Image (tube, helix red, strand yellow):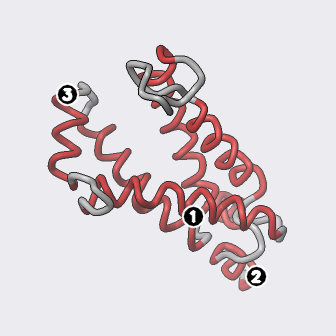
Amino acid sequence: MKNLVKKLLTTNPNIGFSIARLTLGLVIFPHGAQKLLGIFGGYGYSATMESFTAQMGLPSIVAFSIIIIEFFGSISLILGLISRFWALSLTGMFIGIIYTTQLEHGFFMNWYNNQAGEGFEYSLLVIGLALSIVVNGSGKWSIDTLISKKK
């Protein structure tokens, strides 16, 4: 267990990885805040759960996990706290999004509203940033760095 914690917190002290982590956290945060808190034009927790379970047919645990990963995961990424875990969670979530809702619409996003839904290019960018964090850690400016230095 101690080795797992050490692996999760150990990071490459490169500023570039900090930039990737911060970018990913800042991009995902408004989406999580929409779903959990109803800000940034979102509908909040109850309406999001209803939409995910009743309209999209997702199991409650999956719907709940999406909200938690997007909100708390993005905050943790911004802070650099257990970033590998949250980045891996986002990777899995976005693979699921591609498979369940975007693959049928092709690669490109729906910029001109001429498709029935969104393509998966945005999701691939999220996965790429997340995987760089999974592989390299939180980067130079992170809580993970502070914790791993104390151990």
Q: Where's residue 141, x and y in %?
A: 72, 77
Q: Is 69 left, or right, of 8 in this rendering?
A: left
Where residue 10 appears, as percent x and y from the top left, is 75, 66
Who is closer to the viewer here, 38 or 111?
A: 111
Q: Is residue 77 left or right of residue 3?
A: left
SS at mark 2 in the image: helix
Q: Is residue 150 visible?
A: yes
Callout 2, which amino acid? Answer: Lys
Q: Quadrant of residue 86?
A: bottom right
Residue at x 23%, y 45% (from the top left corner): 48
Tell me if mark 3 has few (under 14), some (14-19) or many (20+) residues whose alpha carbon lies within 10 angstroms of its own: few
Task: Read off the residue under disc 3.
Answer: 55
Task: Tell me the number on the disc at residue 77.
Answer: 1
Distance from disc 3 to disc 2, alpha carbons, whole Å, reads 47 Å
**In the image, what residue occupies the spot 55% across and 17% down?**
106
Mark number displayed over residue 149: 2
Task: Determine the CA span between mark 1 and mark 2.
Answer: 18 Å
